[in-house]
Image: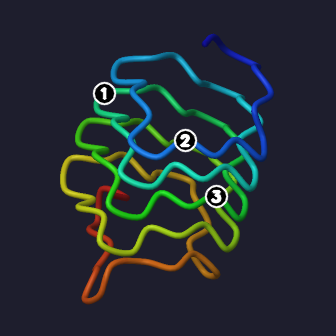
Amino acid sequence: MHAGVAVGGVKSEQARADGANLSEAQLGGAELFRADLRDAALRRADLGAANLRSAEVHGADFQGARMQTTILRETNLDGVDLSGVDLSTTLLPKGYKRNAAGA
């Protein structure tokens, strides 16, 4: 996959996209339960209503991504760049606290 790709509505448990460039990808509504997105570039991607529950996202770059109602429950967000992301309607892991750097 490459920047700008449209794959909204995809249903793929345990998908592998580690290290992929998914910047500006249209992933709204995608079912990415337990997906491997480690070190993936998802800058400005549309992940609205996507399910990333239990996904591996360490090192992923979500800067400026659209994540309205995105499901991140049971997802470890340590080492993830969420700079410029509005998380007000995102379903976050229990106890998640955004740090000063935006992660």
For disc 3, the neighbor class at 10 Å (few under 14, some 14 to 19, many from 20) is many
Image check: 30 left or right of 98? right
Rendering coords of residue 37 (x, y %): 37, 35
For disc 1, the neighbor class at 10 Å (few under 14, some 14 to 19, many from 20) is some
- The residue lying at 33 percent from left, 78 percent from top is 93
Frontmost of labels 3 and 1 is: 3
Rendering coords of residue 52 (x, y %): 47, 57
Compared to 55, does 67 lie above or below? below
Q: Which mark is residue 39?
A: 1
Secondary structure of the residue carrying tag 1 is: loop
Q: Quadrant of residue 103?
A: bottom left
Q: Amino acid at mark 1?
A: Asp
Q: Amino acid at mark 2?
A: Ser
Task: Name the residue tied to disc 3.
Answer: 50
Compared to 26, does 53 lie above or below? below
Return the disc, 2 or 1, that comes first in the chain's sequence: 2
Secondary structure of the residue carrying tag 2 is: loop
Compared to 2, does 65 lie above or below? below
- The residue lying at 64 percent from left, 81 percent from top is 89
Task: Name the residue tied to disc 2.
Answer: 12
